[in-house]
Amino acid sequence: MSRNRKIMAVASEGGHWIQLMRLRPAFEGADVVYVSTNPGLASAFGLQNFHLLPDANLNKKIKLMYLLYKAFLLVRRERPTHIITTGAAPGFAVILCGKLLGAKTIWLDSIANADELSGAGCKVGKIADHWLTQWEHLPEKYPGLEYKGRVI
Amino acid sequence: MIYVTVGTQLPFSRLIRAVNDLAADRGLDVFAQIGPDASHYHAIRTESFISPSDADLHIQKAELVIAHAGMGTIITASQYGKPLIIMPRHFQFGEHRNDHQMATAKRFQDFPNITVVDDKRSLAEAVAAALESVQDENYSSVSQYAPDEFISELRKLLV
Protein backbone atom coordinates (compact mmCIF):
# COMPACT_ATOMS: atom_id res chain seq x y z
CA MET A 1 0.00 0.00 0.00
CA SER A 2 1.43 3.38 -0.95
CA ARG A 3 1.60 5.90 1.84
CA ASN A 4 0.36 9.49 1.62
CA ARG A 5 2.46 12.07 -0.11
CA LYS A 6 4.47 14.21 2.26
CA ILE A 7 6.30 17.17 0.76
CA MET A 8 9.22 18.76 2.56
CA ALA A 9 9.59 22.34 1.24
CA VAL A 10 12.93 23.91 2.09
CA ALA A 11 14.55 27.34 1.68
CA SER A 12 16.88 29.60 3.60
CA GLU A 13 15.39 32.91 4.74
CA GLY A 14 15.15 35.92 2.42
CA GLY A 15 14.68 35.68 -1.33
CA HIS A 16 14.93 31.88 -1.45
CA TRP A 17 12.07 31.60 1.02
CA ILE A 18 9.88 34.23 -0.67
CA GLN A 19 10.23 32.26 -3.92
CA LEU A 20 9.30 28.99 -2.18
CA MET A 21 6.15 30.59 -0.73
CA ARG A 22 4.94 31.38 -4.25
CA LEU A 23 4.88 27.64 -5.03
CA ARG A 24 2.39 26.72 -2.29
CA PRO A 25 -0.53 25.91 -4.62
CA ALA A 26 1.62 23.12 -6.09
CA PHE A 27 1.62 21.39 -2.69
CA GLU A 28 -2.18 21.24 -2.26
CA GLY A 29 -3.50 17.79 -1.44
CA ALA A 30 -0.30 16.60 0.23
CA ASP A 31 1.01 16.88 3.78
CA VAL A 32 3.58 19.67 3.81
CA VAL A 33 6.52 20.23 6.15
CA TYR A 34 8.29 23.58 5.82
CA VAL A 35 11.96 24.01 6.67
CA SER A 36 13.95 27.24 6.93
CA THR A 37 16.61 29.09 8.90
CA ASN A 38 14.62 31.82 10.70
CA PRO A 39 12.03 30.87 13.36
CA GLY A 40 10.05 34.08 12.67
CA LEU A 41 8.93 32.77 9.28
CA ALA A 42 6.43 30.29 10.74
CA SER A 43 4.27 33.04 12.27
CA ALA A 44 4.88 35.52 9.44
CA PHE A 45 3.41 33.02 6.95
CA GLY A 46 0.98 31.25 9.29
CA LEU A 47 2.63 27.84 8.95
CA GLN A 48 1.90 25.01 11.40
CA ASN A 49 4.36 22.37 10.39
CA PHE A 50 7.66 24.25 10.43
CA HIS A 51 11.20 23.11 11.27
CA LEU A 52 14.49 24.95 11.64
CA LEU A 53 17.87 24.11 10.18
CA PRO A 54 21.08 26.07 10.68
CA ASP A 55 22.31 28.06 7.69
CA ALA A 56 25.72 27.26 6.26
CA ASN A 57 28.05 27.99 3.41
CA LEU A 58 29.55 25.35 1.17
CA ASN A 59 32.98 26.80 1.85
CA LYS A 60 32.75 26.44 5.62
CA LYS A 61 33.24 22.75 6.27
CA ILE A 62 32.38 22.55 9.97
CA LYS A 63 29.13 24.49 9.66
CA LEU A 64 28.25 22.43 6.61
CA MET A 65 28.89 19.16 8.46
CA TYR A 66 26.66 20.36 11.30
CA LEU A 67 23.93 21.31 8.82
CA LEU A 68 24.17 17.89 7.11
CA TYR A 69 23.88 16.15 10.48
CA LYS A 70 20.80 18.18 11.49
CA ALA A 71 19.26 17.73 8.03
CA PHE A 72 19.77 13.97 8.19
CA LEU A 73 18.03 13.74 11.58
CA LEU A 74 15.15 15.87 10.32
CA VAL A 75 14.63 13.92 7.09
CA ARG A 76 14.91 10.59 8.93
CA ARG A 77 12.31 11.71 11.46
CA GLU A 78 9.85 13.28 8.99
CA ARG A 79 10.29 10.78 6.16
CA PRO A 80 9.05 13.00 3.29
CA THR A 81 8.12 11.29 0.03
CA HIS A 82 9.06 14.46 -1.89
CA ILE A 83 11.53 17.27 -1.30
CA ILE A 84 11.45 20.61 -3.08
CA THR A 85 13.83 23.50 -2.45
CA THR A 86 14.69 26.91 -3.86
CA GLY A 87 18.10 26.86 -2.08
CA ALA A 88 20.48 27.49 -0.70
CA ALA A 89 22.69 25.40 1.67
CA PRO A 90 19.82 23.91 3.75
CA GLY A 91 18.07 22.85 0.55
CA PHE A 92 21.25 21.23 -0.69
CA ALA A 93 21.67 19.33 2.59
CA VAL A 94 18.05 18.14 2.67
CA ILE A 95 18.20 16.92 -0.94
CA LEU A 96 21.38 14.99 -0.21
CA CYS A 97 19.84 13.32 2.86
CA GLY A 98 16.52 12.84 1.10
CA LYS A 99 18.16 10.93 -1.72
CA LEU A 100 19.82 8.61 0.79
CA LEU A 101 16.46 8.02 2.45
CA GLY A 102 14.47 7.46 -0.75
CA ALA A 103 12.61 10.73 -1.36
CA LYS A 104 11.99 12.22 -4.79
CA THR A 105 13.90 15.49 -4.96
CA ILE A 106 13.49 18.78 -6.85
CA TRP A 107 15.95 21.67 -6.89
CA LEU A 108 14.51 24.92 -8.26
CA ASP A 109 17.40 27.30 -8.71
CA SER A 110 16.84 30.89 -7.56
CA ILE A 111 15.63 33.40 -10.11
CA ALA A 112 18.56 35.54 -8.92
CA ASN A 113 20.99 33.22 -10.76
CA ALA A 114 20.63 34.53 -14.28
CA ASP A 115 24.10 34.01 -15.69
CA GLU A 116 25.37 31.00 -13.82
CA LEU A 117 24.18 28.65 -11.10
CA SER A 118 25.44 29.03 -7.55
CA GLY A 119 28.00 26.55 -6.15
CA ALA A 120 25.27 24.55 -4.45
CA GLY A 121 23.13 24.76 -7.57
CA CYS A 122 25.90 23.20 -9.69
CA LYS A 123 26.70 20.42 -7.25
CA VAL A 124 23.10 19.40 -6.68
CA GLY A 125 22.52 18.68 -10.39
CA LYS A 126 24.03 15.22 -10.19
CA ILE A 127 21.95 14.34 -7.14
CA ALA A 128 18.44 15.77 -7.53
CA ASP A 129 15.77 13.94 -9.54
CA HIS A 130 14.75 17.22 -11.13
CA TRP A 131 17.18 20.10 -11.59
CA LEU A 132 15.34 23.26 -12.61
CA THR A 133 16.36 26.81 -13.52
CA GLN A 134 14.11 29.85 -13.91
CA TRP A 135 16.06 31.14 -16.90
CA GLU A 136 15.30 29.76 -20.36
CA HIS A 137 18.84 30.22 -21.67
CA LEU A 138 20.69 28.36 -18.91
CA PRO A 139 19.91 24.68 -19.80
CA GLU A 140 22.20 24.91 -22.85
CA LYS A 141 25.06 25.75 -20.51
CA TYR A 142 24.37 22.93 -18.03
CA PRO A 143 23.46 19.47 -19.44
CA GLY A 144 20.59 17.99 -17.43
CA LEU A 145 19.29 21.35 -16.23
CA GLU A 146 15.65 22.01 -17.18
CA TYR A 147 13.48 25.11 -17.55
CA LYS A 148 9.78 24.69 -16.75
CA GLY A 149 8.77 28.21 -15.74
CA ARG A 150 9.44 30.83 -13.12
CA VAL A 151 7.99 31.93 -9.81
CA ILE A 152 7.19 35.47 -11.03
CA MET B 1 7.51 56.54 5.48
CA ILE B 2 10.18 55.31 3.07
CA TYR B 3 11.39 51.79 3.87
CA VAL B 4 14.90 50.79 2.85
CA THR B 5 16.28 47.24 2.99
CA VAL B 6 19.54 45.61 1.92
CA GLY B 7 18.89 42.05 3.12
CA THR B 8 20.68 40.20 5.89
CA GLN B 9 23.86 38.86 4.29
CA LEU B 10 26.01 41.88 3.48
CA PRO B 11 26.16 45.61 4.17
CA PHE B 12 25.44 48.01 1.31
CA SER B 13 26.77 51.33 2.57
CA ARG B 14 26.85 53.01 -0.86
CA LEU B 15 23.06 52.81 -0.97
CA ILE B 16 22.49 53.67 2.70
CA ARG B 17 24.83 56.67 2.56
CA ALA B 18 23.02 57.98 -0.53
CA VAL B 19 19.65 57.55 1.18
CA ASN B 20 20.93 59.23 4.34
CA ASP B 21 22.22 62.25 2.39
CA LEU B 22 18.95 62.52 0.53
CA ALA B 23 16.95 62.28 3.75
CA ALA B 24 19.10 65.05 5.28
CA ASP B 25 18.61 67.29 2.22
CA ARG B 26 14.90 66.81 1.84
CA GLY B 27 13.75 66.01 5.36
CA LEU B 28 12.45 62.56 4.41
CA ASP B 29 11.10 60.07 6.96
CA VAL B 30 13.20 56.94 6.38
CA PHE B 31 13.50 53.63 8.19
CA ALA B 32 16.34 51.42 6.94
CA GLN B 33 17.24 47.79 7.60
CA ILE B 34 20.97 47.95 6.96
CA GLY B 35 22.31 44.43 7.68
CA PRO B 36 25.80 43.90 9.16
CA ASP B 37 26.83 47.57 8.84
CA ALA B 38 28.37 49.30 11.88
CA SER B 39 28.31 52.85 10.45
CA HIS B 40 26.15 55.58 11.95
CA TYR B 41 23.69 57.34 9.67
CA HIS B 42 22.43 60.53 11.31
CA ALA B 43 19.41 61.44 9.19
CA ILE B 44 17.56 58.11 9.14
CA ARG B 45 16.37 55.46 11.60
CA THR B 46 18.21 52.16 11.20
CA GLU B 47 18.14 48.56 12.41
CA SER B 48 20.63 45.90 11.39
CA PHE B 49 18.07 43.10 11.27
CA ILE B 50 14.31 42.89 11.73
CA SER B 51 11.93 39.93 11.90
CA PRO B 52 10.29 38.56 8.75
CA SER B 53 6.86 39.79 9.96
CA ASP B 54 8.21 43.29 10.56
CA ALA B 55 9.91 43.35 7.17
CA ASP B 56 6.62 42.40 5.55
CA LEU B 57 4.71 45.01 7.58
CA HIS B 58 7.16 47.78 6.69
CA ILE B 59 6.79 47.06 2.98
CA GLN B 60 3.02 47.00 3.39
CA LYS B 61 2.97 50.38 5.17
CA ALA B 62 5.67 52.23 3.21
CA GLU B 63 4.77 54.81 0.59
CA LEU B 64 8.01 53.90 -1.20
CA VAL B 65 10.51 51.02 -0.89
CA ILE B 66 14.21 51.39 -1.75
CA ALA B 67 16.38 48.25 -1.82
CA HIS B 68 19.29 46.29 -3.24
CA ALA B 69 18.27 44.03 -6.14
CA GLY B 70 17.28 41.16 -3.84
CA MET B 71 14.49 38.81 -4.90
CA GLY B 72 12.74 38.80 -1.52
CA THR B 73 12.09 42.54 -1.62
CA ILE B 74 11.33 42.63 -5.35
CA ILE B 75 8.68 39.94 -4.98
CA THR B 76 7.15 41.23 -1.74
CA ALA B 77 6.95 44.87 -2.93
CA SER B 78 5.37 43.73 -6.20
CA GLN B 79 2.83 41.58 -4.34
CA TYR B 80 1.76 44.70 -2.42
CA GLY B 81 1.82 46.91 -5.53
CA LYS B 82 4.39 49.22 -3.90
CA PRO B 83 6.66 51.56 -5.85
CA LEU B 84 10.17 50.13 -5.57
CA ILE B 85 13.54 51.65 -6.39
CA ILE B 86 16.37 49.13 -6.69
CA MET B 87 20.10 49.72 -6.77
CA PRO B 88 21.98 46.54 -7.76
CA ARG B 89 25.11 45.61 -5.80
CA HIS B 90 28.35 45.75 -7.77
CA PHE B 91 31.02 43.09 -7.56
CA GLN B 92 33.72 45.65 -8.43
CA PHE B 93 32.89 47.67 -5.29
CA GLY B 94 33.02 44.56 -3.11
CA GLU B 95 29.25 44.70 -2.58
CA HIS B 96 28.59 41.05 -3.50
CA ARG B 97 30.33 37.86 -4.57
CA ASN B 98 29.41 38.43 -8.23
CA ASP B 99 27.28 40.67 -10.44
CA HIS B 100 24.07 38.65 -10.35
CA GLN B 101 22.12 41.62 -8.97
CA MET B 102 22.80 43.49 -12.21
CA ALA B 103 21.05 40.72 -14.15
CA THR B 104 18.20 40.65 -11.64
CA ALA B 105 17.71 44.41 -11.95
CA LYS B 106 17.67 44.16 -15.74
CA ARG B 107 15.15 41.36 -15.59
CA PHE B 108 12.70 43.35 -13.43
CA GLN B 109 13.26 46.88 -14.76
CA ASP B 110 10.12 46.68 -16.91
CA PHE B 111 7.80 45.99 -14.00
CA PRO B 112 5.57 49.09 -13.74
CA ASN B 113 6.30 49.58 -10.02
CA ILE B 114 10.10 49.22 -10.34
CA THR B 115 12.77 51.81 -11.12
CA VAL B 116 16.42 50.77 -11.36
CA VAL B 117 19.08 53.28 -10.29
CA ASP B 118 22.85 53.05 -10.20
CA ASP B 119 24.13 56.06 -8.27
CA LYS B 120 23.24 58.84 -5.87
CA ARG B 121 21.98 61.18 -8.56
CA SER B 122 19.67 58.72 -10.30
CA LEU B 123 18.44 57.65 -6.86
CA ALA B 124 17.55 61.26 -5.97
CA GLU B 125 15.65 61.67 -9.25
CA ALA B 126 13.79 58.39 -8.82
CA VAL B 127 12.80 59.22 -5.23
CA ALA B 128 11.50 62.65 -6.27
CA ALA B 129 9.50 61.13 -9.13
CA ALA B 130 8.11 58.34 -6.95
CA LEU B 131 7.02 60.67 -4.14
CA GLU B 132 5.36 63.00 -6.63
CA SER B 133 3.30 60.28 -8.26
CA VAL B 134 2.62 58.15 -5.21
CA GLN B 135 -0.66 59.87 -4.31
CA ASP B 136 -2.38 59.38 -7.63
CA GLU B 137 -0.88 56.11 -8.72
CA ASN B 138 -1.63 52.69 -7.30
CA TYR B 139 0.23 49.87 -8.95
CA SER B 140 -1.75 46.72 -9.45
CA SER B 141 -0.36 44.06 -7.20
CA VAL B 142 1.21 40.90 -8.54
CA SER B 143 -0.42 37.59 -7.52
CA GLN B 144 1.12 36.06 -4.42
CA TYR B 145 1.59 32.77 -6.26
CA ALA B 146 3.63 31.62 -9.24
CA PRO B 147 1.89 31.50 -12.67
CA ASP B 148 -0.66 28.66 -13.03
CA GLU B 149 1.27 26.93 -15.83
CA PHE B 150 4.37 26.67 -13.67
CA ILE B 151 2.36 25.41 -10.68
CA SER B 152 0.86 22.65 -12.81
CA GLU B 153 4.31 21.68 -14.14
CA LEU B 154 5.52 21.34 -10.56
CA ARG B 155 2.43 19.34 -9.57
CA LYS B 156 3.38 16.81 -12.26
CA LEU B 157 6.81 16.45 -10.66
CA LEU B 158 5.36 16.11 -7.17
CA VAL B 159 3.35 12.92 -7.79
Image (spheres, coloured by chain):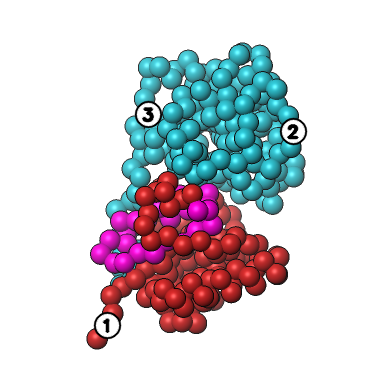
Mark 1 neighbour class, 10 Å CA radius: few under 14, some 14 to 19, many 20 or more:
few
Q: Is residue A17 magenta?
A: yes
**Chain that the image shows in red:** A
Q: Nearer the viewer, mark 1 or mark 3?
A: 1
Q: Say which chain tag 1 marks.
A: A
**Chain that the image shows in cyan:** B
Between A109 and B53, the one nearer to me in the picture: B53
Which numbered disc covers residue A2? 1
Mark 2 neighbour class, 10 Å CA radius: few under 14, some 14 to 19, many 20 or more:
few
Residue under numbered circle 2: B39
* Residue extending farthest bottom: A1
Residue under numbered circle 3: B139
Give the extent of the magenta segment: A10-39
Both marks 1 and 2 on one chain: no
Amino acid type assigned to the residue bearing label 3 in the image: Tyr
Both marks 2 and 3 on one chain: yes
Q: Which residue is drawn at 41% across and 76% down?
A: A79
Describe the element under mark 1 as helix, strand or loop. Answer: loop
Q: Say which chain tag 3 marks.
A: B
Both marks 1 and 3 on one chain: no
- Give the CA separation, mark 1 to mark 2: 57 Å
Q: Are marks 2 and 3 in contact (CB under 8 Å)?
A: no
